[in-house]
Image (spheres, rainbow, N blue to C red):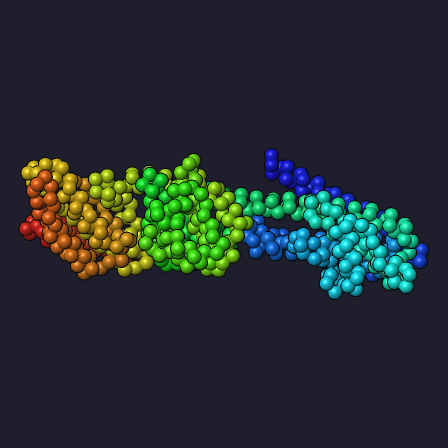
Amino acid sequence: MAGAGALLLLGGATGLVAGFLIGARRRRRTAAGAAPVAAPPAPRPPRPTLNPVVVLRGDDIAALDERDAQELADELRPHLHDVARQHGASEATLWRRVDGEEAPLQIVAWSGDGPPPDGASWGTPPERALVSWSAAEQMVGFERRDGEPRVAMCPVRFASGEPAGAIVLSAAERFSTDRDALRDWLPRHAAQVGRLVSLFSTRNEVARQSRFTRALLRIARDLQRAHEPGALEASLCDYAVEVTGGEFSMLLRWDATSRTGRVAAHSERTPILLREGSVTEGSVAGAACVEGSAAFWEDARFLAERGGLLRDDDGGVVAGSMAVLPMMRGPHAIGALLIGSSRPGVLRALEIRNGSVLSALAVNALEAAWELAETSRRSRTDALTGLWNRRHFDEQLDRVLAETDRFGGSCALVICDIDFFKKVNDTYGHDAGDVVLQRVSTVLHDGVRTVDICARLGGEELALLLPQTSLEGAVELAERLRLRIEALLVAHGGVTIRVTVSMGVATYTAGTQGKGTIFKRADERLYAAKHAGRNRVVGATI
């Protein structure tokens, strides 16, 4: 309903503006003996179409304000031209305060071609002073030359409540309308101009809010469509930069229960020191999440004095502007957007409002994506060891083999079995067996790259899937991990348990035969290692 009302208001305001301008043109008339004036200006070019995401940032707003001012001058020029012709004036100008009540009046529109004259150099100093007096005192005034009124002015009030301005007529020799009639006509013209300006401002504000709403709706739609958490997180960081004008942004994921968080995603220009890691409660970002309130520094050069930005001891980051915008679910934060710039004053109240609206829009989509990802992770993770389970391993094996064919090179598979694991269970109990399995899994997980897949296939059998790895590299890694496991001293129930493992290694090279037998070959090498005395690595290539 709010959107429909805005559109109706926009249409009504536009229609009223058009009606006033058309009526003014139809009422054109030339008074007898009127002084010659400039011909009506050529039709202005059509208004360009804006990208729906423009007009969100402060810089965009400033550019739009400048363009709107030019469009207002173009819209009022025909009307002021008619007023000048009616009274035999050489020009008609509209004076207005653009930068607040204390700023001097400026000429914002006139009846001639081209941009309006500079108010600071217009006329004579007494004439400029008289214009300011007329606007301030709300009085009609005249400036005489050679006994005849040569300049006439009347205050203009705007319905929007802006500071008053003035409409000013200037004659080359004399006005065609006598002084008393002009005193009667000027307030009518001023009231008409005031209505036109107010309607124009109303139309622009409605249009601006409409553009702002469309931009946010487009962003909300895009965020809703991004079901994959990584894509959603990255898009959110990019949008945060887009709508605020910041140089970089980060998405923080926050756990209200433990009062800790981590960096989930970041934009391209985020400083390297901020791209990953944990977020602690005592940091600037952590405190904002705990308190659930936005923190904003237009000049953040002294932000380091308040403590670490992400962690208590990280020393903060030198930045010109910084904002932390918590993403709230009820009374608790589930995350936050951190937006920064190296220059002070880049992030202002308007930009922070945009960022806050963005974070509110993203909460539902982000929370749903994180919950789905967590559900998927649990369904693919072994509950005891925390490693990937057999289902995920099988999917990743197909993927890695396909990528090896596509990009070339070779991949490796290592199957690992804990030696005499049944004896550990029988001697020390299944609880001790679980601890042994967890400790071995930790060694394997911590000893591989992030691109490698470490999984529990079942029982005491574990596996490593190594993309872009040769046989020699896989055997070397397996041997290094075997030695680390052999050095383990697993303490449980007052006893110390020594552990060893046997490993079988197989590789697949792109374009060769036997891709479907890599698992079988690695399993065969595992049994060969066991038959050879256990606690060893046996490798083979396909």
Number of callouts: 0
The image quarter in which residue 2 lies: top right
Q: Residue at x 18, y 44 (%)?
A: 438
Query: Is residue 44 in sight in this rendering?
Result: no
- Percent coordinates x, y for residue 519 in the rendering: 20, 48
Q: Nearer the viewer, residue 430 or 200?
A: 200
Q: Residue at x 10, y 48 (%)?
A: 489
Q: Where residue 144 sits in the image (x, y, percent)?
A: 87, 60
Q: Residue furthest top?
A: 1
**Residue plotted at (63% across, 40% down):** 6
Q: Is residue 16 above or below residue 40?
A: above
Visible residue check, residue 130: yes
Q: Is residue 74 left or right of residue 380?
A: right
Q: Is residue 65 left or right of residue 521?
A: right
Q: Please state the horizontal and vertical placement of residue 104, each as a whole percent of the image.
A: 70, 57
**Quick one: 456 or 383, which is closer to the camera?**
383
Q: Residue drawn 36% across and 53% down?
A: 308
Q: Quadrant of the N terminus?
A: top right
In this view, the residue in front, 188 or 276, is: 188
* Residue 266 placement, left or right of 389: right
Quarter the C terminus occupies: bottom left
Residue 184 percent across, percent down from the top left: 87, 47
Answer left or right for 184 relative to 102. right
